Image (spheres, rainbow, N blue to C red):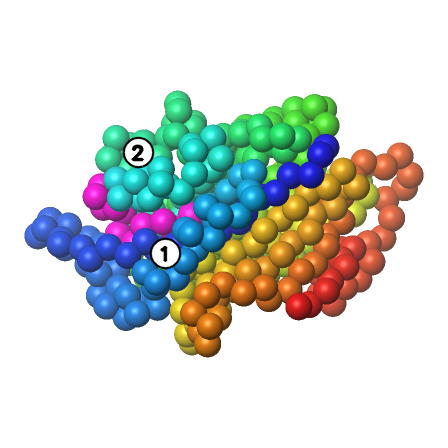
Amino acid sequence: MNSFTLAHISDLHLPFEPQLRLRQRLSKRQLSAWAWRRRRNVQSEEILAALSAELRAAALDHIVITGDLTNFALPEEFTRAAAWLQALAPADRISIVPGNHDALVPVAESEGLGRWSAWTSTDGRWPFVHHRGGLALIGLNSARPTAPGLARGRIGAHQLAHLESALNAEARSGRIRIVAVHHPVAAGAVGWRRALADRAALCAVLERAGAELVLHGHAHAARLDALPGPRAMRGMIPCLCVPSSTARASAGDEAARWHRLRFSAAGAVEVAVRQWSMAEARFVDSGCYRVCLPRPTTRPHAAPEQIGSSPMRLQQTVA
């Protein structure tokens, strides 16, 4: 494929001061409203504005957002998020998967995710597949309403079956397959209360069908993990997490970050890190690294090179 540039952002938690009605207070939303009193100084409107301007100015082919655009899953938030997305880029240049905050409580499709159908799936079905250049962006919905104190996700057997079919079909087409999901896929990325309940089942699908890259959020920390792929593929599947793209550095958050991923015909992706600088009040270059994507091989499955705790081939330069 020719060069293709993609931005990965996540966990925007778009600022919104809720005016909860009595019925809405008798739900998990009230707990999130109390939590927002602490988070409103972390999720920065200043950083959001800078992020929007930078993404509009960058030479990007596509933007992937891995969830948590809202805080309380209120209908007004889905509407405001849709307006923000419309101002950011044309609809065919953005793909979204929802996060746990986008499913804090059950919300009717017409008042919730249905308002984002231009960036997900017009028929409301998951997973969706967006073809962009030589890429196949496959979006999973791991967002499920949970009990207070939990932020767990679940994909479900139906989605997993369709995911496997999509991965196999896109492999035959020769496209680079990118799986986007909110919750982490690698073991130990987050604690039990915030984990993906059927993570093992998802990993089993990826190991059977393969993928070239997995993108996720939710951890509010930068991660680069490696997942086993099929024996017919040479190399592990890179699994990349971006922290909240609008957060000030705090005890629970790394400074806001977004990743510019440039795919090349050589079967690699160069990841440029843009991180918020408190001193300069702007995004700055924070590093760049190159990840070799897994590829088909007719030879016996080779043992991957060991790079720290991530068994994948990685070349890195730090700015």
102 vs 44, nearest the viewer: 44
State if disc 1 and disc 2 touch (CB < 8 Å).
no
Q: Quadrant of the C terminus?
A: bottom right
- Mark 1 lies on a secondary structure that is helix
Amino acid type of the residue that numbered disc 1 sits on in the rendered structure: Ala
- Mark 2 lies on a secondary structure that is helix
Which residue appears at 47% of the width and 37% of the height? 94
33 vs 300, nearest the viewer: 33
Q: Quadrant of the N terminus?
A: top right
Q: Which mark is residue 115?
A: 2
83 vs 23, nearest the viewer: 83
Part of the protein shown in magenta: 67-77
> Which residue is label 1 attached to?
49
Which residue appears at 49% of the width and 63% of the height? 283
Asked whether the viewer can see residue 211, the reply is no
**Is residue 210 positioned above or below 169 on the image?**
below
**Is residue 90 positioned above or below 263 on the image?**
above
Query: Which residue is the extreme one toward the left?
Result: 22
Residue 147 percent location from the top left of the image:
30, 54
